[in-house]
Amino acid sequence: MNDRGAICGDWTIIGETRKPFKGRYPGCGIVEPVRIRAVSGILLSQFATLDCPTAITLKAWLENTAKPAFADQGGGLKGLRLAGHYACKTQNNQPRARLSAHAQGRAIDISSFILMDGTIITVQDGWADEDTKDVMRELHAGACGVFGTVLGPDADRFHAGHFHFDTTRRRNGSYCR
């Protein structure tokens, strides 16, 4: 178990490695889990349990899209409020649906962005707000191609209040809605 740095071979991913585990349903669990608290200087509202490819992809998106998107607002990006990470569940918690990417630690849900000056921009309100809608769309578009699946408020009723990013790869490339 590491207390700091070198998580997934990257000193800017702060957290600890964990032991492999399985969930209560077949297919749930993570072979090489990490529990992260901050990525690239951005604090997470809670520890997130993920696999390394997802943690590394989150870092790439933060560095290339999220931090630049907020560079001129509120002193820059300070943190992310998470709505979800590892959970042994089906897609959208629907009966008989396929397992969610969350069930293998390949997904993270972000509900809000916290700026250095204390401003909190929620995905739900920011998506339609005149002052923040362009940044929200920039964040969404910047995740497309980096992550395998990107869902936001326009995707469906289940994603009205957060961005869902996962590293599931599809035959036809990224799925962005």
Image (cartoon, grey):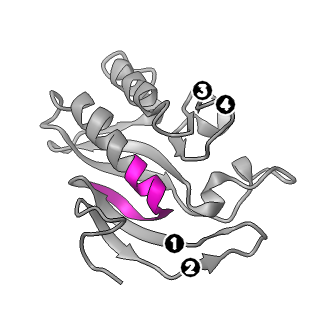
Per the image, label 2 sits on a secondary structure element best described as: loop
Residue wearing tag 2: 20
Is 50 magenta? The answer is yes
Q: Residues within 10 Å of mark 2 (few under 14, many from 20)?
A: few
- Disc 1 to disc 4, how far (Cα)? 31 Å
Q: Residue at x 27, y 79 (%)?
A: 3
Q: Disc 1 residue type? A: Glu
Residue 110 position in % (x across, y down): 45, 46
Label of residue 32 in the image? 1
From mark 1 to mark 2, how far is it between C-alphas? 6 Å
Pinpoint residue 77: horizontal percent, then vertical percent. 22, 41
Q: What whole-number distance in Å separates the C-alpha atoms at marks 2 and 3? A: 32 Å
Of mark 1 and mark 4, the one earlier in the sequence is: 1
Magenta range: 43-57
Distance (Cα) linking label 4 and label 2: 33 Å
Q: Which residue is mark 3?
A: 177
Q: Are marks 1 and 2 in contact (CB under 8 Å)?
A: yes
Which quadrant of the rendered structure holds the N terminus?
A: bottom left
The amino acid on which the numbered mark 4 sits, given as a three-letter code, is Asp
The residue shown at (31%, 42%) is 62
> Residue 87, position in %: x, y?
62, 63
Residue 156 marker: 4
Q: Position of residue 165 (x, y in %)?
A: 52, 43
In three-dimensional space, the C-alpha distance between marks 3 and 1, rounded to whole angstroms, equals: 29 Å
